[in-house]
Every structure is written in C-alpha cells, then in structure tokens.
Image (tube, rainbow, N blue to C red):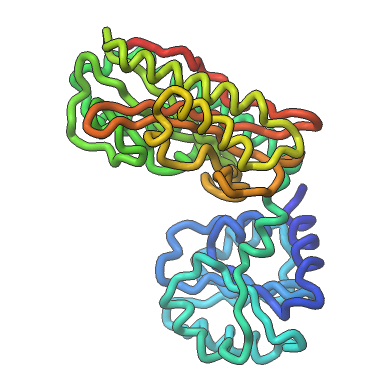
C-alpha cells in the first residue's frame, strides 16, 4: 500500500472527529508520507494533515530534495531558512483551519520545545494522541510491508549464523554488540532496529542490560537481542548461546524457555486473544518452578517501530488478527547468575501464525 493510499485512509478516519493532525518526524510521518528526514534536531519540520484537503508542510530548506522525492501531493509547502521564523507559517495555517470539531491530533513524540512554541496557537483545541488513530491502521500490515519485514528477518537470521562462527571468548559485551551492528549493515540493512543488547554471565539476568566492558568468559550464557531495519521496517530476534561447557542448571532452564517459546508460537492462531499467548508461556514457567523469574510480557507488535501494537500482555484481551506482526520472547532470569531468552518474529496468516525469523533455537555452544 502506497503512502498516498495510507494517507487517504488516515484522513478518512479523521472526518467528523478532528480538524487536523500535526505530525513531526516520526514513524507516523514515515507511514503516512514515506518521508524520514534525518538530523532535523531543533529545526521545525511539520506536516499538517486535514480531513478534507491536501496536507501542508513546513520544513527547513535543507530538506528540499527529499521533499521533492516524496510521493505525496502537498497543497502548500513552506520552506524556511535559518534566518526565518517558521512559526509564522504555522500560525497562518492554524488560523485558517476550519475548527468545526475543536480537536487536533498531536504527534506523540513531538519535541517539547516545538509543543511549547505552538501551544498558544492550539490552546483553543482539545488535543488527542495521533497514535490513537494511526495504530489501528498500522497494526495490519500490507503484502508490501510483509515483504520488507521478511527481508529484515532474513538479515537478522544471517547475522546470528555469522556470529556463531566467531570465538567470543575475551570479547567485551560492547565489542560483540558493535560486531553485530556491523554484520547487520554488511548484510544489507541501513541501520539496526534498536540499540543491540549483549548480556553475558550474570549480566544476562538483566532483561534489558546495556552492553558493558565485561569480557565474555568460559561457561557464560550470552543473550544477544538485536534487529535489522530494512527499508523502514524492523526485525527483532533474541538468541542465547553458551560459551563452552555449561552446568546442568543452565541447560535445564534453556530447555524450559525453549518449550515455552515453542508452545506459545504453536497456539498463536488467527483470532486468539493476546493474553492467551502470554499465559501459555507463563504456565510452562510456573509448572517448572520459574514463574517468578519470567518478569516481562511475552511479546509485542513489530513494524516501523520495534515496539508497537499489539502488546502480548497478561491482561490484553485484544485478538491477534490476519496481517498483524508480533514477537514471542519468553525468558527466565536468575539474579546474579544467568538468564535465557528466545525471541522470534511472527506474522498472522489466514489460520495460524508464520515464524519469520528462522535461526537455530537449539542451544549453541560457541
């Protein structure tokens, strides 16, 4: 589905509810326009979308070439230079909006300095979250989006398989994270989906550990959580590997996590409630005596953002439907000892979910 078609669906959803949407650089801007301006920093770059007419754009002249490449028909484009006041244009736009609904959609990630600069102009409106509208559209992926996500998953798989050929002993967590990032880009991704997580030994008991200078050692369990962003779409994979011979307890815990992850993937059929997938994995942890050591949700939606709807939590009664993409990533974490997590990317088909990431899930000893 083209950005033009997405924008048309979005403006249709706005009618009779909102007078406009103010969208700064974000995943929403990319989804609706195909534009992803980089290094905007403090400069005002803002799309104003209306329910009944072509959108307006205020942007630094520095981005003129990118704007001309965009596949969106903007009604008005205001390009400004560093000596200009871009908010003059915005005040004019806001003044001309037909405020019949008295309600504006505001980009959730809008920088506070921009919001403070425009607050006086928008105080006459009620503000609503832009994500409340776009998330409903973004949850269901088109065939074109799916092809990009499959490619991102392939890059993640290939990256893990290359890492398995390395001798990680003596390498710091930071060094391994940098190596993973390099291989991801070498394999065809422009960037990573998020900051790569590498957690070794006792650090692997922290689910979102920041890579440190700790050297990877013999008998370590090493969690690697990473993803590739391909043409704007993310993959997100986690694998846990062993360095040499490990103890029986590490093998036992790995087996429990693998079983929980396998069973959760197996029951992920079209129409299932998100909470039931979480429960399936959680019950296996509890049955084996590790329920308290599974400390996060079993998964999350995936797409332009590495975390988006749907969220697979214990209390989410929402159903997983055809076209949704999400992760399944149970884990067990034993404080000050070690942790294990296995994560795959899933796509819901007509009847059941298909696993996009296919890298080996058996315990690998490096």
Q: Is residue 190 visible?
A: yes
- In the depicted structure, whether residue 259 falls above or below residue 87: above
Quadrant of the rendered image containing residue 358: top right
Q: Nearer the viewer, residue 103 or 56?
A: 103
Q: In percent of the image, x 71 and y 34: which residue is there? A: 348
User: The C terminus appears in which quarter of the rendering?
Assistant: top left
Q: In percent of the image, x 80 and y 74: which residue is there? A: 15
Q: Is residue 232 visible?
A: no
Q: Is residue 339 left or right of residue 14?
A: left
Q: Is residue 77 left or right of residue 300?
A: right
Pinpoint residue 24: horizontal percent, then vertical percent.
55, 68
Pinpoint residue 221: horizontal percent, then vertical percent.
30, 21
Pinpoint residue 113: horizontal percent, then vertical percent.
41, 77
Q: Nearer the viewer, residue 136 or 262?
A: 262
Q: In percent of the image, x 74 and y 28: which residue is there? A: 352
Tell how many labels.
Answer: 0
- In the depicted structure, whether residue 338 falls above or below residue 7: above
Pinpoint residue 180: horizontal percent, then vertical percent.
37, 29
Q: In percent of the image, x 76 and y 35: which residue is there? A: 270
């Amino acid at each position: 589905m083209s950005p033009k078609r997405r924008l048309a669906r979005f403006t249709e959803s706005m009618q009779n509810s909102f007078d406009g949407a103010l969208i700064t650089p974000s995943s929403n801007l990319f989804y609706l326009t195909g534009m992803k301006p980089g290094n905007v920093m403090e400069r005002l770059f803002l799309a104003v979308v209306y329910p009944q007419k072509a959108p307006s754009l205020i942007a630094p002249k520095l981005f003129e070439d990118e704007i001309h490449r965009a596949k969106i028909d903007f009604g008005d484009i205001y390009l400004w230079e560093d000596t200009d006041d871009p908010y003059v244009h915005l005040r004019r736009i806001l003044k001309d909006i037909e405020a019949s609904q008295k309600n504006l959609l505001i980009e959730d990630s809008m920088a506070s300095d921009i919001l403070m600069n425009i607050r006086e102009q928008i105080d006459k409106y009620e503000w609503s979250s832009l994500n409340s509208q776009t998330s409903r559209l973004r949850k269901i992926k088109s065939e074109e989006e799916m092809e990009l996500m499959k490619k991102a998953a392939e890059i993640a798989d290939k990256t893990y398989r290359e890492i398995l050929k390395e001798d990680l002993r003596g390498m710091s967590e930071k060094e391994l994270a940098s190596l993973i990032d390099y291989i991801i880009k070498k394999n065809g991704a422009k960037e990573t989906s998020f900051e790569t997580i590498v957690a070794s030994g006792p650090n692997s008991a922290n689910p979102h550990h920041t890579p440190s200078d700790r050297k990877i050692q013999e008998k370590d369990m090493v969690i690697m959580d990473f993803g590739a962003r391909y043409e704007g779409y993310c993959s997100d994979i986690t694998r846990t590997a062993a360095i040499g011979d490990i103890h029986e307890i590490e093998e036992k815990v790995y087996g429990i996590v693998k079983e929980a992850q396998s069973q959760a993937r197996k029951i992920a059929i079209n129409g299932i409630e998100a909470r039931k997938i979480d429960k399936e994995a959680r019950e296996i942890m509890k049955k084996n005596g590790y329920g308290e050591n599974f400390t996060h949700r079993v998964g999350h939606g995936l797409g332009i953002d590495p975390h988006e709807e749907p969220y697979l939590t214990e209390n989410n009664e929402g159903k997983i439907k055809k076209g949704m993409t999400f992760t399944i990533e149970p884990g067990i974490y034993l404080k000050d000892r070690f942790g294990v997590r296995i994560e795959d990317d899933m796509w819901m088909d007509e009847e059941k979910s298909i696993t996009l990431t296919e890298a080996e899930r058996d315990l690998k000893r490096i």
